[in-house]
Image (cartoon, helix red, strand yellow):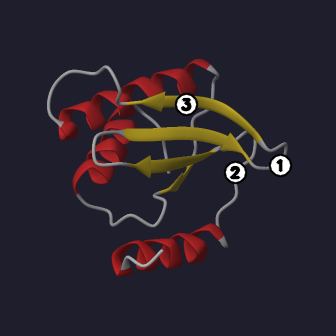
Amino acid sequence: MSNLKELKRVRRHKKIRSTLSGTAETPRVVVSKSNTGLFVQAIDDVSAKTLFSVSTKGLTGNKTEQSKEAGKKLAEEIKKASIEKIVFDRGGYLYTGRIKEFANAMREAGLKF
């Protein structure tokens, strides 16, 4: 990892991750980002299982609109399992752009974090 920007992101993620943990009642929603997509998982850290996952692959619109749509999809899946509260792990990424739109879409769909 010679890229300074990536090193800083990994450092931020380690610091954030040291304080966050998800359970079956309040799963940890983890965001991974690439140049073309956004990949999100809802994880139960106690049993080390992925409960739900969603990706922006195959969605239409620009990246920001895809992030909003992915946030709505994941929120619907989580609410179907009668879960109202989550822990949001932004993966060390700054809370702007696609990450912010994804989180806002989940809040608008009724999840609390």
User: On the picture, is 70 further left or further right than 64?
Assistant: right
Q: Give percent across and percent down for residue 24.
A: 75, 39
Q: Amino acid at mark 1?
A: Val
Q: What residue is at 50 percent from the left and 72 percent from the top?
A: 10
Q: Could you say which disc has been placed on residue 22 in the image?
A: 2
Check disc 2: other Cα within 10 Å, few if <14, some if 14-19, many if 20+.
Answer: many
Label 1: which secondary element:
loop
Q: Could you say which disc has been placed on residue 53 in the image?
A: 3
Label 2: which secondary element:
loop
Of residue 79 and residue 47, the one placed in the foreground of this image is 47
**How far apart are the alpha carbons under marks 3 and 1?**
17 Å
Dot placed on the residue nearer the N-terminal end, 1 or 2: 2
Q: What residue is at 25 percent from the left and 60 percent from the top?
A: 96
User: On the picture, is 29 further left or further right than 56?
Assistant: right
Marks 3, 1: nearer the viewer: 3
**How far apart are the alpha carbons under marks 3 and 2?**
15 Å
**How far apart are the alpha carbons under marks 1 and 2?**
7 Å
Dot placed on the residue nearer the N-terminal end, 3 or 1: 1
Q: Give percent across and percent down for residue 83.
A: 62, 31
Q: Amino acid at mark 2?
A: Gly
Marks 3, 2: nearer the viewer: 3
Q: Give percent across and percent down for residue 38.
A: 37, 41
Q: What residue is at 33 percent from the left and 52 percent from the top?
A: 99
Label 3: which secondary element:
strand
Q: Amino acid at mark 3?
A: Ser
User: On the picture, is 84 further left or further right than 91?
Assistant: right
* Residue under numbered circle 1: 46
Q: What residue is at 76 percent from the left and 49 percent from the top?
A: 45
User: On the picture, is 112 further left or further right than 81?
Assistant: left
